[in-house]
Image: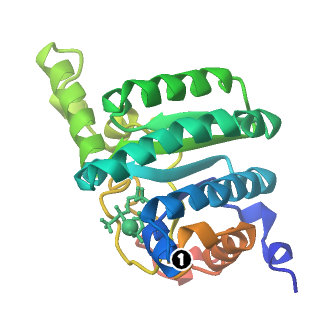
Amino acid sequence: MDIKSEIDLDKLPRHVAVIMDGNGRWAKQHGKPRVFGHKNGVRAVRETTEAAAELGIEYLTLYAFSTENWKRPKLEVSALMTLLVETLHQELSTLLKNDVRLNAIGAVEKLPAATYETLLKSIESTRNNQRMTLNLALNYSGKWDILQATRTIAHKVANATIRPEDIDDELIAKYLSTAGMPDPELLIRTSGESRISNFLLWQMAYTELYFTPVFWPDFGKSDLYQAIVAYQQRERRFGKTSDQLLP
Ligand code: IPE
Ligand code: IPE
Ligand code: MG
């Protein structure tokens, strides 16, 4: 049976997060430099975004560049930043056609100026789109997110706009970069690695984790469908017993 038809559209995750990993190894497999893998990863970004929007997923968050990725060779970092600019230019029409709103999470103001400006322009051009929000995590890390929220809250406590006793789960979530969005129900990581790598730490407290050996450039629509089918077969207990979940 076609995998897409196995998806229960009434039980879709509202928010899917993806750690797009394995570009370098994919390139190596093809006897090419790492950057060749990144370039080929763009097709997977386009297909995944389109498939998610077509299904009716509300938020798709893609981990594109972590705080730790600055430690990579200079040439690879600058190639990634240039690729991002090119991709944003190239994909803008597809985002508009698919009614996808672009958003960024992370310390994006610290990206190279050309990347930052192109990013802001693309976000601005798509701001009225309704079908899905595509979050690009850029210069992002989960610890950074919690830290920046903590700092903002601390300032508000210092100037007495928030009382320490008002700080709860909900208030913290309001100051994270994902404010107003549901936590991801599903995380997909490609390339066979089984780790979180400082992605959405607070937001993934109860996320279902799905690891696939597929390298990111080979990831396609059917891989997304397969991850969603696997997610729908899981029992999400949130601390309760299985019996308590029966209707
Ligand atoms: C993911 O692929 C892309 C980024 C982190 C920017 P990698 O570049 O990490 O590929 P591998 O893990 O080295 O194969
Ligand atoms: C995680 O991939 C970051 C992104 C996908 C942007 P990495 O390839 O950087 O992760 P580690 O360092 O192997 O954990
Ligand atoms: Mg990697």
Closer to the camera in the image, 232 or 41: 41
Quarter containing the C terminus: bottom right
Closer to the camera in the image, 234 or 243: 234
Q: State ligand 1's quadrant.
A: bottom left
Q: Secondary structure at mark 1?
A: helix
Q: Is residue 132 left or right of residue 15?
A: right
Outermost residue on the left side: it is 158
Q: Is residue 165 left or right of residue 126?
A: left
Query: Under 8 Å from ligand 2: the CB of mark 1?
Result: no
Give the image location of residue 163, x and y in percent: 19, 24
Q: Is residue 126 visible?
A: yes
Label 1 Cα crowd, 10 Å radius (few <14 / some 14-19 / many 20+): few
Quarter containing the N terminus: bottom right
Q: Residue at x 46, y 58 (%)?
A: 35
In the rendered view, tell whether residue 192 sits above or below residue 9.
below
Q: Residue at x 60, y 61 (%)?
A: 40
Q: Is residue 96 left or right of residue 134?
A: right
Q: Residue at x 49, y 70 (%)?
A: 32
Give the image location of residue 10, x and y in percent: 78, 62
Q: Residue at x 73, y 29 (%)?
A: 129
Give the image location of residue 142, x and y in percent: 31, 50
Q: Is residue 209 visible?
A: no
Q: In the rendered structure, which amino acid carries the disc numbered 1?
A: Gln
In the rendered view, tell whether residue 99 sits above or below residue 225.
above
Q: Identify the coloring.
A: rainbow
Q: Is residue 163 left or right of residue 97?
A: left
Which residue carries the number 1 mark? 244
Give the image location of residue 200, x and y in percent: 38, 53
Closer to the camera in the image, 227 or 50: 50
Q: How many marks?
A: 1
Outermost residue on the bottom side: it is 1
